[in-house]
Image (tube, rainbow, N blue to C red):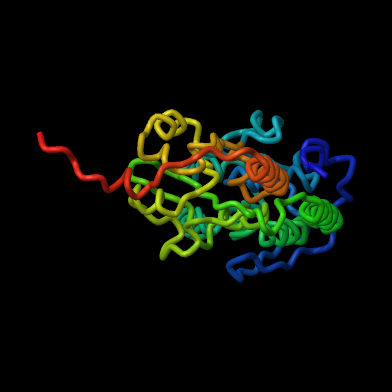
Amino acid sequence: MALAAVVAFPLTMASPARSAPIRVRDARGKLFVASAPPKRIVSVAPANTEILFALGLGPRVVGVTDYCDYPPQARKLPKVGGVQLNYERILSLRPDMILATVNLQAGAIARMDALHLPVFAIDPHTVAETIGAIQLVGRATGTEQAAHAVARRMRATLAGIRRPPPGKRLRVLNIIQLQPLIVAGPGTFMDDCIRLAGGVNVAADAKAPYPTFSVEEAVLRKPQVILTAKRNLAALRSSPVWRTVPAVANGHIYSPDPDLLERPGPRVVDGVALLAGILRRAAAAPKAHVAGARGALLAPRKPA
């Protein structure tokens, strides 16, 4: 079951916030205390904005970042900056909660703490942790029932995903940047999404979350599906080296909506379902003959 409706039309589902005092520890272990559920919330990450709207808290969101574009109502809200936050603007909105993300905004959180702003931070690194973060936000905003409902729907969506059969799990390469080649490795959000969709991340054994690979190293791992941004498609398809890779030779290079797969919010399970569909179709498709990658990469140059 897709969650788009949950995010787009939350007010029909979310329960009224309770009026009891709030005492909840955030992802840092810091105690967030309020005499009543927050009424003026600033979101400083797009995924957090999606979480707030999914919990029916849209009317209480008074500020968002330049990148907060979903649901569409969020685009009309006052902006508090992008990569660099405008702290004066945040202060002017008189927030009683600022919903931040630890792994992306450690510096900004420290600055807001120094300004004695009411920061509540979450820190999801996997889909399961995203569901937990949504429930944590529900506790901090007095919307536990709505949070539990969203969590149930997300788990139900995951449970209903049709994955490729165990014997047909495809090798997947997620290219973040082409030159130099940076890929998604272990412990990343995409690594978790690939696994949940029924794929195998060919960079799962790397030593860093976002390792720099040589092209040879990537090609020799023979990915059967490549996920990357649209701007990289032409270069991959036109490269004699990359054309030796099964994913390129068979046309299995995809650019799924990054907002579904890279934002740790309610829609991520829809992204996993989308990715599972890609993997199922790729597993069932006819395969082209692929020339040896090592020969294409290591063939000696002819003398000039």
Image coords of residue 163 (percent x, y): 72, 51
Q: Which of 111 and 83 is in front in this view?
A: 83
The single residue placed furthest to the bottom in the displayed view is 29
Image coords of residue 244 (percent x, y): 42, 41
Residue under the point 45% across and 43% down:
245
The single residue placed furthest to the left in the displayed view is 304
Q: Identify whether 90 is placed above or below 77.
A: below
Relative side of 106 to 302, left or right = right
Residue under the point 61% across and 33% down:
78
Relative side of 168 to 162, left or right = left
- Could you tell me how many numbered marks the image carries? 0
Relative side of 93 to 299, left or right = right
Residue under the point 38% across and 47% down:
293
| Residue 143 shows in the view | no
Q: Which of 304 and 252 is in front in this view?
A: 304
Q: Nearer the viewer, residue 112 or 286?
A: 286
Query: The N terminus appears in which quarter of the rendering?
Result: top right
Image coords of residue 286 (percent x, y): 62, 38
| Residue 163 shows in the view | yes
Relative side of 141 to 64, left or right = right
Query: The C terminus appears in which quarter of the rendering?
Result: top left
Residue under the point 45% across and 45% down:
176
Image coords of residue 160 (percent x, y): 81, 51
